[in-house]
């Protein structure tokens, strides 16, 4: 069973790889839309990757109200 | 289709539709690759009537205001039908609003029934204002088995016995209260009558008739005026099939096109633009000779379909493109925001007609639509049958505020006679949009009333008009504002337009982009040029239909930037 901290780390690794950004530029409390420079449609594409990685289902609405990587990781963690 | 002039209410028309098309497939709900449910019109009725019985057994009286906060799914439509059947007033709310905003609107609408999904209910309950609402009944869908719902009731278990009572409504009775805005300030609850919807549906289906052969893919939320009309009322009265997809993820939209042999879909410009980008990338990867052939075929298709679309012919010219859309697509419908003419033309040249129009919640759904005979990329079409459009106080170029009159115009704003009196004057709805009407009777929109500049030469320039000249700029998104609108200055003259650019992911605003801005600017008449640009590093705020919230964006820019940040050209 992962801890929340592990989930956050894995999320940041994945986001950095997917959007080709240096991992060290991403922090848990960053605004993910601003940091990754993505819109809501691109964020949905990221959800697909996250589902594959974490082996869970993330409905579109899980992005509602999420701004930070930490908040998204919490949503993921609740479904693990 | 049903003869809508015979009906008094949406409930009555839908009730007859469920009988008339009983054996036809009515609704399919898909979630990713799964099919959650598939209902005939008869089965839809069988799901809805026990819900009506239960509502009535709980004391649901005529004119009860019932709000729905749900994503795009079958229970939305079943619940809405139950509310209409029982003579209630539907309050569709945007599930993408924050819980606080939703509570504000629930309070303003004085809703006493709420039907929502479990995650939204959970979020609402955590808000301070939740317990101050006067909700008598809360129905929650898809709650996990172990969830403690407190006083709320599981939608799936809320079933009554016996035949429910159909409550007749008259045409002038209120059908819906739809919020066109007001999340940031003064709530604008558009009070729409049964007549508004029935007449709107009648005029839209006169231009674009649906039939039982239509398979409509619904991806916009049904609280959106367009999906409510084009993805619910319209298809139902015509016996069509509605396919609800519970995700906007592109890979599943592509799959749905093929699996369900989709014939029609409504999109907002942002999604259309994304589809365009994907196709253009595929075309760019083709070998040079194939690309040249494709462009030649697009020109040929444009000529062959110059009078009207011919989708069958176009499918033969572009079999791969049409196959990617499932091979049955007849038309895309776009609405909710201004669509760039080049995007409309791109799809039309590939044999995918895009029906573009203009509407606003205050006018039910649509005011004008392009009938595609012939296709026009540069206008939002002609007024719908029974709808009058006039231009108020036109200037030397014929541009003025667009005013609308017709049976589609709302009754009033809820509890706001002052705003109503400002907005509906002598029976004409003042839209706040600016436009002009050409000799063919087509409406051209050029911008909003407030965000504009007047040049020193006395010309009125509208940012949305100038934006079209920057189409295709290799940035993620951009928007033009009048500088004085962003940072008001109490003086006239020397007014300036600013391009606000949000660079593509992972890119700074490269020199190439700067050069393109300068080049495009140089191609514009002097009075239409942008005077500077501002680099913006956040996503533009958008509505549920992905329309840019210009006033919100302007406010953000006002707060975080000043004139000193502008890079002047």
Image (spheres, coloured by chain):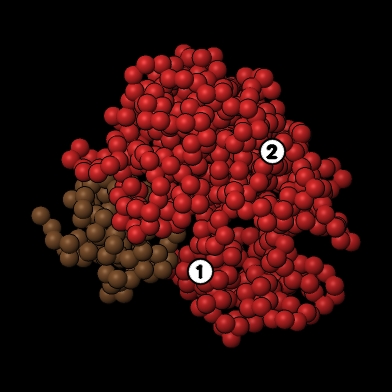
Residue B261 makes an appearance in the image:
no
Chain A colour is brown
Residue at label 1? B503
Looking at the image, is mark 2 or mark 1 nearer the viewer? Answer: 2
Q: Residues within 10 Å of mark 1 (few under 14, many from 20)?
A: many
Total tally of numbered discs in the picture: 2
Please state the horizontal and vertical placement of residue A60, each as a whole percent of the image.
36, 48
Q: Measured along the vertical axis of the image, is residue B319 above or below residue B458?
A: above
Chain ID, mark 2 = B
Which quadrant of the structure image shows residue B329? top right
Work out which quarter of the rendered image holds the C terminus of chain B and state it.
bottom right
Please state the horizontal and vertical placement of residue B566, each as a whole percent of the image.
60, 81
Q: Nearer the viewer, residue B553 or A10?
A: B553
- Nearer the N terminus, badge 2 or badge 1? 2
Please state the horizontal and vertical placement of residue B340, each as a whole percent of the image.
65, 53
User: What residue lies at 46% left-to-right and 39% top-to-bottom?
Assistant: B66
- B368 relative to B16 in the view: left or right: right
Q: Nearer the viewer, residue B228 or B301?
A: B228
Please state the horizontal and vertical placement of residue B326, each as a whole percent of the image.
48, 32
């Amino acid at each position: 069973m992962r801890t929340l901290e592990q989930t956050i780390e894995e999320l940041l690794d994945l986001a950095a790889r997917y959007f080709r950004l240096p991992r060290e530029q991403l922090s848990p409390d960053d605004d993910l839309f601003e940091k990754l420079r993505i819109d809501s449609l691109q964020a949905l594409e990221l959800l697909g990757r996250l589902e594959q990685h974490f082996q869970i289902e993330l409905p579109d609405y899980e992005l509602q109200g999420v701004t930070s990587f930490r908040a998204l990781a919490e949503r993921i963690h609740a479904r693990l | 289709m049903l003869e809508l002039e015979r009906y008094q209410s949406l409930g009555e028309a839908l009730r007859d539709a469920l009988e008339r098309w009983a054996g036809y497939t009515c609704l399919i709900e898909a979630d990713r690759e799964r099919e959650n449910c598939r209902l005939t019109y008869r089965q839809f009725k069988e799901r809805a009537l026990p819900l009506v019985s239960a509502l009535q057994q709980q004391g649901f009286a005529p004119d009860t205001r019932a709000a729905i906060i749900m994503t795009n799914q079958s229970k939305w439509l079943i619940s809405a039908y139950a509310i209409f059947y029982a003579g209630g007033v539907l309050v569709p709310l945007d599930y993408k609003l924050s819980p606080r905003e939703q509570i504000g609107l629930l309070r303003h609408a004085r809703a006493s029934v709420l039907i929502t999904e479990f995650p939204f209910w959970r979020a609402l309950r955590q808000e301070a204002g939740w317990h101050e609402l006067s909700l008598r009944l809360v129905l929650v869908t898809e709650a996990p088995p172990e969830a403690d719902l407190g006083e709320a009731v599981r939608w799936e278990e809320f079933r009554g016995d016996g035949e429910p009572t159909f409550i007749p409504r008259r045409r002038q009775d209120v059908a819906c209260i739809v919020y066109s805005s007001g999340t940031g300030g003064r709530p604008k609850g558009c009070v729409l009558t049964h007549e508004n919807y029935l007449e709107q549906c009648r005029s839209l289906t006169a231009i674009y008739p649906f039939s039982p052969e239509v398979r409509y893919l619904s991806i916009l939320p049904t609280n959106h005026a367009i999906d409510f009309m084009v993805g619910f009322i319209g298809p139902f009265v015509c016996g069509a099939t509605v396919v609800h997809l519970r995700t906007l993820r592109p890979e599943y939209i592509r799959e749905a096109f093929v699996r369900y042999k989709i014939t029609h879909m409504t999109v907002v410009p942002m999604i259309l633009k994304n589809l365009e980008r994907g196709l253009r990338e595929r075309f760019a990867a083709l070998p040079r000779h194939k690309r040249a052939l494709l462009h030649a075929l697009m020109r040929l298709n444009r000529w062959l379909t110059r009078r009207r679309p011919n989708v069958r012919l176009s499918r033969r010219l572009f079999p791969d493109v049409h196959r990617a859309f499932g091979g049955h697509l007849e038309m895309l419908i776009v609405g909710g925001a201004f669509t760039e003419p080049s995007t409309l033309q791109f799809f039309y040249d590939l044999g995918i007609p895009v029906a573009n129009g203009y509407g606003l919640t205050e006018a039910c759904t649509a005011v004008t639509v392009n009938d595609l005979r012939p296709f026009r990329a540069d206008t939002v079409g002609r007024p719908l049958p029974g709808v009058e459009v006039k231009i108020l106080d036109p200037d030397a170029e014929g541009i003025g505020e667009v005013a609308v009159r017709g049976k589609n115009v709302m009754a009033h704003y809820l509890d706001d006679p002052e705003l109503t009196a400002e907005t509906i004057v002598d029976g004409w709805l003042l839209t706040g949009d600016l436009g002009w009407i050409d000799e063919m009777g087509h409406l051209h929109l050029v911008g909003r009333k407030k965000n504009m500049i007047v040049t020193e030469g006395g010309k009125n320039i509208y940012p949305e008009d100038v934006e079209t000249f920057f189409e295709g700029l290799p940035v993620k998104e951009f928007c033009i504002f009048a500088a004085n609108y962003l940072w008001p200055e109490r003086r006239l003259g020397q007014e300036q337009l600013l391009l606000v650019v949000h660079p593509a992911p992972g890119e700074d605003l490269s020199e190439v982009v700067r050069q393109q801005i300068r080049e495009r600017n140089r191609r514009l008449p002097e009075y239409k040029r942008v005077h500077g640009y501002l680099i913006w590093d956040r996503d533009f705020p958008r509505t549920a239909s992905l329309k840019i919230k210009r006033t919100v964006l302007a406010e953000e820019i006002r707060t975080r930037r000043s004139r000193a940040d502008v890079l002047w050209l």
